[in-house]
Structures are given as C-alpha cells and as structure tokens.
C-alpha cells in the first residue's frame, strides 16, 4: 500500500540480544515483499547509540535487554521529539498483563509475545513484516 | 501470540461512511478470532461510547479501536488525542483507517500516539485485504491489554 513507488529500503532497527531470535527475524524480514534494511542492536545502550545518529522507519524491541532495559529504551524514544513518531513493536517473551498494559501506556505501537516454538515465532515475525512493511503507512 | 481467547475481542469502529462500515463488517465476520464489532458514526459518539456516557451506559470497553480521521462533529485527530491523554483509555490500540495519504496526517497521527496508520484503498478487493491484514495482525498476533 505504501512506498511502492519509493526506492529507498525501509530501515528497521532490531533490538534483540538473543542470537537465535535475531536469525529468525532476519530470515522472516528477508522474505518480506518490500525491500528493507535491518540494523541490529544487541542491547539497550547500543540501540540508544544508534538512534542518536539514525532515525529508522520501524523499531522491533525486546523488553529484557542487557545494559539498558527495553522499557527504558521505549520510554526514551517516545519522549524524544526527534524519535517519538517511529512505530515501536515490542517483541518479548513476557506475557505479564502488567507488562502489556504498561507498555501500551508508554505508547508502544504494538505488543507481540514471542512464541517458544520456532515455526510459530517465524509466523509471528512474518505477520509483523506483512502488516508493518506492506499495509501500514509509515511516517 | 493470542491463543484463541475464551472471550471475543471487542472492536470499536469509528466510521461515518456506511459503505466502509459494511465492508469492514464483512471482512471481520470471517475472522479466525471471535470478535464483536461496535460502530459509531462520529467523534462525539466515539468518546461517549468509550466513556460509557448517555445512551452508551452499557457499552463494553473495546480492546481495539479502528478510527477514521475525517468525521462529523469531532474529527478523528481530536478523538485520538483525547483517548491517548486519558489514563483510563490510553492503553487501547488505535489503528487509523483513512483515505488521507497526506504525509502531514501520517506524521501527526503517529506523534499523537496512533498505534498504526493505514490508508483505505479505493479498490474493493484491496479494502477487504487491508481489513483482513489488520485482523490478522491485531487479533491473531498482537497481545492486547484486557484492562
């Protein structure tokens, strides 16, 4: 729907410390119809560093991260005039209702729980890609 | 991933175009996840529904809101702003569903904390596909807050 005429790839920042999850996510996003470029940050501090120099089109953010927690990364992004418009999809293993409600309250754009089964994980990431890269109009 | 919840997902559609309402209903009827669609036709009714005011005293709190931007009485932008400022409502995801492709509307909506911005295709099949994708992502993949 969006960007069909644009040639620049969609810039995605993936903030994830689990190597397996990074691999699965990259695999799923490579299959997305729209060209995208994924930058990987392995912890919250790396993510914040990257965001000082770059404004990605979409952020996929784990909550439990080394150094700076994902919750704090999210709050900092959504309070920053330069960054607050960027959609942040939280992808986490936490199913706690407390995390879900609080995450939406600090303006996460969507909350997705990571399925443990790799096939289900791939399906979830495929669905994230299909919706955010093909259906949504990104800012 | 939302494992088929025992209770249906409650969706509030704020849309003044009867044709788009009919199509959205049609697309959601076949959804894998059980859902109840509630429809209001303008921004004032949307807020009354969400705050259970007047004739909406018995309204349920929706899990997801689909919001058009160009609405009578109170536009979607104002509804978005009020919901996202209201501590009792701000956790409810709002998907903007509009014909506007204006970059200004897109940016402003995200800055006002819209959860996603989707443009309505004019073509019927495309419209159904888009609503189908919204359903697939928000009802099957996303974890909604049932507060």
Image: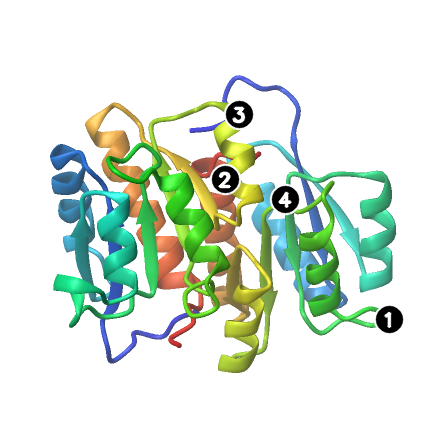
Which label number is shown at residue B109? Answer: 2
Which residue, given by chain and number where applicable, does mark 3 sit on? B103
- Binning the other alpha carbons within 10 Å of mark 4 as few (below 14), some (14 to 19) or many (20 upward) gives many
Secondary structure of residue under mark 3: helix
Front-most of residues B85 and A121 = B85
Which residue, given by chain and number where applicable, does mark 4 sit on? A86
Name which of mark 1 and mark 4 comes first in the sequence. Answer: 1
Can residue A116 be seen here? no
**Residue A22 spot, x, y in % from top left:** 70, 59
Asked if both marks, 1 and 3, belong to the same chain, the answer given is no
Secondary structure of residue under mark 2: helix
- Binning the other alpha carbons within 10 Å of mark 3 as few (below 14), some (14 to 19) or many (20 upward) gives few
Q: How is the image coloured?
A: rainbow
**Residue at point 71%, 44% (across, down):** A83
Which residue, given by chain and number where applicable, does mark 1 sit on? A67
Q: CA distance from mark 2 to mark 4?
A: 11 Å
- Binning the other alpha carbons within 10 Å of mark 1 as few (below 14), some (14 to 19) or many (20 upward) gives few
């Amino acid at each position: 729907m969006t960007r069909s005429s644009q040639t620049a790839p969609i810039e995605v920042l993936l903030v994830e410390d689990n190597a397996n999850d990074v691999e699965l996510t990259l695999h799923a996003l490579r299959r997305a119809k729209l060209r995208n470029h994924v930058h990987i940050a392995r912890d919250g501090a790396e993510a914040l560093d990257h965001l000082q120099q770059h404004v990605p089109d979409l952020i996929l953010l784990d909550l439990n991260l080394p150094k700076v927690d994902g919750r704090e990364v999210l709050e900092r992004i959504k309070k920053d005039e330069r960054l607050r418009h960027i959609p942040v999809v939280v992808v986490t293993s936490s199913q706690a209702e407390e995390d879900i409600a609080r995450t939406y309250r600090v303006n996460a754009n969507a909350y997705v729980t990571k399925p443990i089964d790799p096939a289900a994980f791939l399906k979830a990431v495929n669905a994230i890609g299909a919706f955010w890269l093909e259906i949504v109009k990104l800012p | 991933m939302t494992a088929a919840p025992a209770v249906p997902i409650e969706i509030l559609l704020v849309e003044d175009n009867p044709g788009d309402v009919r199509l959205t209903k049609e697309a959601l009827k076949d959804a894998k996840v059980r859902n109840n669609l509630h429809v209001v036709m303008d921004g004032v009714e949307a807020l009354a529904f969400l705050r259970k005011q007047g004739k909406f005293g018995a309204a349920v709190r929706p899990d997801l809101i689909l919001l058009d931007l160009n609405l009578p009485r109170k536009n979607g932008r104002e509804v978005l702003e009020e919901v996202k400022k209201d501590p009792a409502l701000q956790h409810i995801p709002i998907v903007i569903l509009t014909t506007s492709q204006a970059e200004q509307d897109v940016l402003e909506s995200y800055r006002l904390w819209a959860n996603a911005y989707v443009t309505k295709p004019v073509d019927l099949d495309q419209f159904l596909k888009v609503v189908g994708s919204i359903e697939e992502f928000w009802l099957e993949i996303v974890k909604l807050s049932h507060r």
